[in-house]
């Protein structure tokens, strides 16, 4: 069967070039938007490598090690994503009267500075040869792959995600589970795009993908709310006395959190039922 190396590498090349470019821009100056772009490209690398792990299951650990030089960067870029969401949550719940919450805003600014500084240091510590090694390894492990092997690998990964979704149709969705579901849906979306890029049909219908997109959009404000609730709760937990103005805001955040969690739970069960049949 004909190798799909040229096709599969075209898919990887687009993300690799985009990731390497934004990495170079961030080595000059850290910007949250660019950092989130890089985080997205690293997510694609991880999913792509997971496909290669399935193909080369006997050398799974060797394939997995390809991403090692970028693990610390990936973890800290996620912190950039979180601190930005918390800042957005601040604007939503406390932004009307920021002067009343100046102490917490100062804490947020300090946290942001620390996170950005850490990311910048990590970026400067990663040599370009690590990017070259990543590309060479991906090309090496992609050699000899056929449409059949890629189809089988992607189908296995998606089935694993569906099994997890099926489990959660029977259980109550806690914050950690919702975070995992969000990651699973993002992974499924990336895998479907890879399939289409090499001429395979999508596993799920357009209607299911439409509902995935709607749920993903609904998860964004939930994430902002959840992260703000955690961050503000931790901040106030260090205080001997919490002022009424903070108590009122915290109560509102908690109330909204319960409502959004319930709505997401219902939408998840509806979507997963369709994905499973």
Image (cartoon, rainbow, N blue to C red):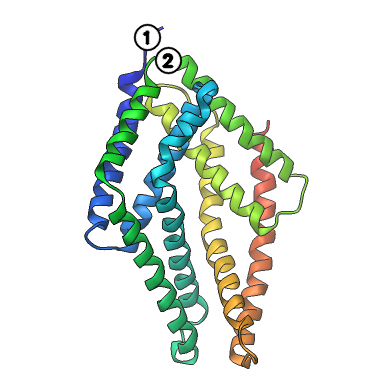
Badge 1 crowding class, 10 Å Cα cut-off, few under 14, some 14 to 19, many 20 or more, is few
Q: Which residue is label 2 attached to? A: 146
* Rendered-image quadrant of the C terminus: top right
In the displayed structure, 121 sits above or below 4; it is: below
Marks 1 and 2 close (CB-CB < 8 Å): yes
CA distance separating discs 1 and 2? 6 Å
Badge 2 crowding class, 10 Å Cα cut-off, few under 14, some 14 to 19, many 20 or more, is some
How far from the left and from the top, in percent, is residue 257? Answer: 64, 68
**Which quadrant holds residue 218?**
bottom right
Tag shown at residue 112? none
Report the front residue among 43 and 259: 43
Helix, strand or loop at mark 2: loop
Q: Which residue is label 1 attached to? A: 2
Question: As drawn, is 213 to the left or to the right of 169?
Answer: left
How far from the left and from the top, in percent, is residue 135? Answer: 31, 33
Q: Which residue is situated farthest in the right direction here?
A: 170
**Residue 195 visible in image:** yes
Instruction: Answer with mark 1 or mark 2, whichever residue precedes in sequence.
Output: 1
How far from the left and from the top, in percent, is residue 58? Answer: 54, 21
Residue shown at the point (29%, 36%) measured from the top left: 14
In the displayed structure, 250 sits above or below 15; it is: below
Report the front residue among 16 and 125: 125
Helix, strand or loop at mark 1: loop
How far from the left and from the top, in percent, is residue 133? Answer: 31, 34
Residue shown at the point (36%, 60%) measured from the top left: 119
């Amino acid at each position: 069967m004909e190798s799909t190396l040229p096709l599969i590498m075209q898919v990887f090349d687009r993300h690799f070039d985009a990731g390497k470019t934004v990495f170079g821009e961030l080595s000059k100056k850290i910007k949250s938007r660019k950092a989130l772009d890089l985080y997205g490209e690293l997510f694609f690398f991880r999913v792509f490598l997971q496909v290669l792990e399935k193909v080369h299951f006997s050398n799974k650990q060797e394939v997995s090690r390809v991403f090692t030089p970028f693990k610390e960067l990936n973890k800290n870029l996620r912190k950039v994503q979180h601190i930005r969401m918390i800042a957005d949550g601040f604007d939503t719940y406390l932004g009307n009267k920021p002067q009343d919450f100046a102490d917490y805003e100062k804490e947020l600014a300090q946290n942001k500075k620390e996170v950005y500084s850490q990311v910048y240091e990590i970026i400067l510590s990663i040599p370009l040869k690590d990017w070259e090694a990543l590309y060479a390894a991906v090309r090496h492990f992609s050699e000899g792959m056929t449409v059949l092997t890629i189809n089988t690998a992607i189908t296995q990964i998606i089935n694993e995600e569906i099994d997890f979704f099926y489990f959660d149709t029977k259980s109550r969705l806690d914050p950690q589970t919702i975070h995992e579901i969000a990651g699973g849906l993002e992974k499924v979306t990336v895998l479907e795009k890879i399939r289409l890029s090499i001429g395979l049909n999508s596993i799920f219908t357009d209607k299911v993908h439409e509902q995935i997109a709607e749920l993903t959009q609904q998860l964004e404000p939930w994430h902002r709310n959840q992260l703000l609730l955690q961050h503000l709760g931790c901040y106030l937990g260090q205080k001997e006395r919490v002022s009424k103005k903070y108590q009122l805001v915290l109560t509102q955040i908690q109330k909204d959190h319960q409502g959004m969690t319930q709505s997401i739970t219902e939408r998840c069960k509806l979507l997963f039922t369709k994905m499973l049949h």
